Image: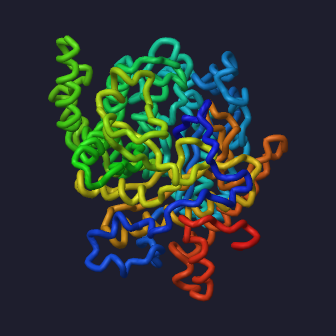
């Protein structure tokens, strides 16, 4: 999960009761995407239907965010363990992931709540230092391997597909003291870790994600400096993404050569992207600025794995700016022919993490009284400045507990269509999608409405647009520890009382709703028309929403 929480809470966020959005526009929220349909007026705001046969529907977590057991049974220290132990001031509430939801001890509770949801897939990650305490393959911690074996076996026994992420940002501290992702040495260290994972679990795990959100990891850790190693270098993003893509491709090709024939699994990578739309769709300048934003955001990571190189527009811009700065070598690295061949086509599916949307214009046409979104330590040079655009949020978009998360359900369909139109309609699994709220909110109607709208947009992308989407994982199953935000916000379908030694998992209203969706594999109101009028109230999301006791 990406997190830009610190110091950026928006005063226009949803109320603590989780029930009210700000008033906003009330036109049909899918209007932008009905243009390709012969008679757009015939497409209702809410599309009744089911997901395709075999569609994966479930939830996601990440090891450091839920496992706890930070030093249990031979586990090594991760860089995040090191941060919370030595630099607690980096965390908003000075909390840690030392115990968290205690999934290390209570994984069977997690399997049970997944079963109660009716989930048929669970995305989790494998802790690198729990398997390799020293970071390299010189010592394999069998207790760590046994833990994941127990989890995987329990999932399969309950009809739940394990979807395993190999790297979700918890680098072993033993490695972090020597290298970071600016160093190419990490490529082979990561590949060795991936080999251990494939060898240990690949007989049962058939869906793998190599790396979670390479772009976010690069920006938030090496440019903004909010996550370890806390580097503030606007020029580092390209180098870090470059090495993360190499690590992904090396692991993919290793699986292909050593395991694919016998294990017959699929390997992908989770890429993140918010939606991007021109501030003025009739402005050629805004359309061009939006195209640059797409190519620098999603194109930066998707284009290489599909075509073997960075987007031509991105290459042209950075090369020219580097030349203008007097540099003899472009700030955007290039892949040699060997790496181009490795990276091109290095996926069997693409994981897609999505939350929100941004509007795009040029700096010259920036609207008054809006805050510019800059995911960089510099507005003058580097990744963000290279785009020559001005990105912002519409003030009418409802806001979650996290300032960067807006209620813009059409955006997920937009990005899914971008994948289809630009990258040959690859198989996509939505590996993260969710809404943040206060931790104490149990009747989380904001999150419930979010899932209703976003899941319906995914359904439209599949059934109307023909996007090759084969799965969806809600973020997140539990009240996970949200990196530097700690426990100040929650994305969890289930509330976890951190003061309770048993860490009881309590379903929120959103969990009960998702259980209804999962019970019929789609939109249950197709089969229960007597509730349709109530559903129309829920889906009129761009008018002031009713309070929970009025709407339910």
x then y, percent, for residue 273: 40, 45
| Rendered view: 503 above or below 223 | below
x then y, percent, for residue 167: 48, 35
x then y, percent, for residue 129: 57, 27
354 or 350: which is nearer to us?
354
Looking at the image, which residue is at 55% across and 37% down?
3
- Left or right: residue 541 versus residue 81 is left
**The quadrant where residue 529 appears:** bottom right
| Rendered view: 99 above or below 29 | above
Identify the coloring: rainbow
**The quadrant where residue 489 appears:** top right
Residue 270 visible, this angle: no
- Left or right: residue 397 versus residue 85 is left
Picture quarter with the C terminus: bottom right
Looking at the image, which residue is at 30% across and 45% down?
290
Looking at the image, which residue is at 51% across and 49% down?
395
157 or 182: which is nearer to us?
182
108 or 452: which is nearer to us?
452
x then y, percent, for residue 2: 52, 39
As drawn, which residue projects farthest toward the front?
368
Picture quarter with the N terminus: top right
39 or 314: which is nearer to us?
39
- Left or right: residue 401 versus residue 320 is right
Looking at the image, which residue is at 53% across and 58% down?
121
| Rendered view: 132 above or below 185 | below
Count numbered badges in the picture.
0
Residue 297 visible, this angle: yes
As drawn, which residue projects farthest toward the bottom?
530
As drawn, which residue projects farthest toward the right?
500
- Left or right: residue 19 versus residue 298 is right
């Amino acid at each position: 999960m990406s997190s830009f929480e610190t110091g950026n809470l928006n005063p226009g966020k949803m109320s603590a009761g989780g029930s009210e959005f700000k008033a906003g526009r009330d036109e049909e929220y899918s209007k932008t995407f009905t243009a390709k349909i012969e008679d757009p007026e015939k497409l209702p705001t809410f599309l009744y239907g089911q997901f395709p046969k075999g569609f994966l529907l479930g939830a996601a977590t990440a090891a450091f965010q839920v496992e706890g057991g930070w030093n249990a049974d031979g586990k090594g220290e991760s860089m995040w363990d090191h941060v919370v132990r030595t630099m607690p001031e980096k965390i908003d509430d000075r909390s840690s992931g030392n115990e968290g939801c205690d999934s290390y001890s209570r994984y069977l509770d997690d399997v049970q709540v997944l079963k109660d949801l009716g989930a048929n897939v669970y995305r989790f990650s494998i802790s690198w230092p729990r398997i390799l305490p020293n970071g390299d393959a010189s010592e394999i911690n069998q207790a760590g391997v046994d833990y994941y074996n127990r989890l995987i076996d329990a999932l399969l026994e309950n009809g739940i597909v394990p979807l395993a992420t190999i790297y979700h940002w918890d680098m072993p501290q033993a490695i972090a003291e020597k290298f970071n992702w600016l160093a190419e040495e990490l490529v082979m260290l990561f590949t060795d870790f991936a080999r251990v994972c494939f060898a240990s679990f690949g007989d049962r795990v058939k869906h793998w994600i190599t790396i979670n959100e390479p772009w976010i990891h690069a920006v938030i850790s090496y440019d903004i400096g909010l996550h370890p190693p806390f580097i503030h270098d606007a020029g580092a993003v390209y180098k870090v993404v470059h090495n993360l893509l190499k690590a992904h491709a090396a692991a993919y090709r290793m699986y292909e050569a050593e395991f694919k024939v016998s294990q017959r699994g699929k390997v992908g990578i989770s890429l993140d992207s918010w939606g991007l739309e021109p501030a003025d769709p009739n402005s050629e300048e805004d359309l061009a600025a939006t195209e640059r934003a797409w190519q620098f955001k999603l194109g930066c990571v998707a284009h290489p794995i599909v075509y073997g190189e960075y987007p031509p527009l991105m290459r042209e811009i950075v090369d020219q700016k580097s030349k203008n700065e007097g540099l003899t070598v472009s700030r955007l690295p290039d892949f040699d022919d060997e790496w181009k061949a490795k990276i091109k086509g290095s996926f069997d599916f693409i994981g897609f993490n999505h939350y929100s949307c941004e509007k795009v214009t040029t700096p010259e046409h920036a609207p008054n009284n809006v805050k510019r979104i800059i995911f960089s330590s510099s507005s003058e040079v580097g990744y963000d400045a290279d785009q020559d655009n001005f990105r912002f949020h519409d003030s009418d978009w409802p806001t979650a507990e996290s300032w960067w998360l807006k209620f813009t359900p059409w955006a997920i369909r937009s990005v899914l269509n971008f994948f289809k139109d630009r990258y040959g309609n690859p198989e996509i699994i939505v590996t993260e999608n969710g809404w943040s709220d206060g931790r104490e909110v149990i009747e989380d109607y904001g999150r419930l409405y979010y899932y209703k709208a976003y899941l319906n947009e995914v359904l439209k992308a599949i059934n109307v647009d023909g996007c090759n989407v084969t799965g969806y994982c809600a973020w997140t199953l539990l009240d996970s520890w949200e990196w530097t935000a700690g426990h100040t916000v929650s994305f969890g379908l289930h509330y976890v009382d951190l003061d309770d030694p048993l860490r009881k998992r309590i379903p929120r209203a959103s969990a009960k709703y998702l259980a209804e969706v999962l019970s019929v594999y789609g939109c249950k109101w197709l089969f229960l028309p007597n509730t349709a009028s109530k559903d129309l109230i829920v889906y009129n999301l761009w008018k002031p929403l009713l309070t929970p006791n009025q709407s339910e």
